[in-house]
Amino acid sequence: MISTAQILYVTSFALILIGLYAVVTQRNLIRIVIGLNVSDVGINLLLVTLGFIDGGKVPIFAPGQAAGLMVDPVPQALVLTSIVIGFGVTALMLTLVMRIYAHHGTIDASRLRGLKW
Amino acid sequence: MRKLAGILLIGGLVFYMASLVPALFMPSARTSLDSIGTPIIESSERVSGSANVVTAIVVQYRGLDTLGEVTVLFLSALGVAILASGLRDDVFSSMFAQDDGGFILQAGGRFLFPFIILIGVYIILHGHLSPGGGFPGGVLIATALFILILTGESSHMPHRLLNVLEGIAGLGFIGLGALGFMGTEQSFLTNVLPKGEYMTLFSAGFIPFIYAMVGMKVASELTTVVATLTEAPVNTEAPVNTEAPVNTEAPVHGSTKEKGRP
C-alpha cells in the first residue's frame, strides 16, 4: 500500500532530479536558472512532506471545529522563508545573466570562456 | 555522453538523499506528531492568540528570523538595482519589446488591477485566521503592478514612492518590535497589544500589524525588482529606437571583446 507521504516524497525527489539534470546538461543560462527553480520547488515540497501526517489537518484553528490531529507547522513556516529566499536568489541570478549578456553578447555557457569580467 | 554523465551523477545524488529519508521506505504511514510542532500547536493560542499556527510561528515564535528574511529580500532588491544600473540602454531595448500589449490586454489589466489589490489586502489582513499573510499578499499586490508593466500600461513605476513605502514598512516592523520593550518581558518583538477575541479579525495582538508591514515591504520590493529589470535606464534622451541598437551596438560590443581574448 502506497501512502500519501510516499507519493509526495517520490514527487519531490523527481522534481529535484529534473532541476539538477537541467543544471548539469543545459548550456543556456536561462534554462539553468529555470532548472534551479524546479529544484527549489522540489526541496520545498520535501520539507513540507517531512512534517506530513496521514490524516493530519491544516495547522489552523477554525471556529466550530474540533481540534484534531494537525500536520507539523514548523516546516511550513521554514518553507515560507525558503520561498522568499528562492525569489531573491532567482532575481539576482537573472540580473547576472543580463550582465553576462551585456558583456559577452551570449548566454551560452559553453561559449563563455575565461573568468575575466 | 554529457547527458549520460549528468543522469548518473544526479541519479546517484538523489538516491543518496532518498536513502536519508526512512519514511520513504516505511510501509505504514506516520500517524502522530513527535516534534517541536506539538508544544507549539498547544501553546499558540496562549502565546500569540493567532488561530493560524504557521503565522504564529513566523511572526511570534521566530519574529526575528522574519525580520532577517525581509532584510534578505531588501538586499536582493538592492543587488538587482546595483547590477542592473550598469546595463546600457541598448541591452534593455534588445531584450524587451518596446510596443504595448494591445487593447484587450491593457483593458483586461486595468479591469483586474483593483480586484487583485483587494484580494492581496484581504490575504494580508487575514493572515492570522486563514492561509496566507504578508508574504503571499504582498506578492499578489506586486502581481497587480506586474500586469500593468507587462501590458505596457505603465512603463515607469514611481521608484521614489516605492522606496519611501519600503522604508516606512521596514521602520514600522522594527518600531512594532521595539514596542515589546514596554511590556513586562521587556524584549524585542514581544506582543504588548491586547490579544482581542480568539479567531476574530481583531485578534492576535501585533501580528496583523507586523504582517501589514511585511506585505507593504514585499509588495514594494518585488515591484522594484521587476520594474528595474524591465525598464530602460531613465537617462534616455532620444526615444528608444527598436531596431538600431539591436543590430549594431550589442553584437559589436561583444565581438570586440571576443577579438581581444587569446
Image (cartoon, coloured by chain):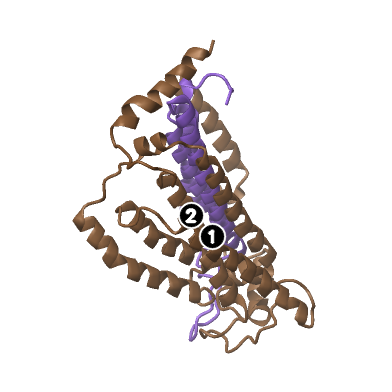
Report the amino acid beneath label 1: Asn
Q: Is any part of residue B27 visible from this angle?
A: no
Chain shaded brown: B
Query: Where does the image place residue B23, in percent across and percent down from the top left?
Result: 58, 51
Upstream in the sequence, badge 2 or badge 1? 1
Report the amino acid beneath label 2: Thr
* Residue contact between numbered discs 2 and 1, judged by CB atoms under 8 Å: yes
Mark pair 2, 1: CA separation: 8 Å
Q: Which chain hosts label 1?
A: B
Residue B224, numbered label:
2
Q: Quadrant for the C terminus of chain B, please.
A: top right
Quarter of the image where one finds residue B177:
bottom right
Chain shaded purple: A
Q: What residue is shown with label 1? A: B163
Q: Left or right: B239 with respect to B159?
A: left
Query: Where does the image place residue A37, in percent across and percent down from the top left?
Result: 48, 44
Identify the residue shown where x is 30% and y is 66%: B112
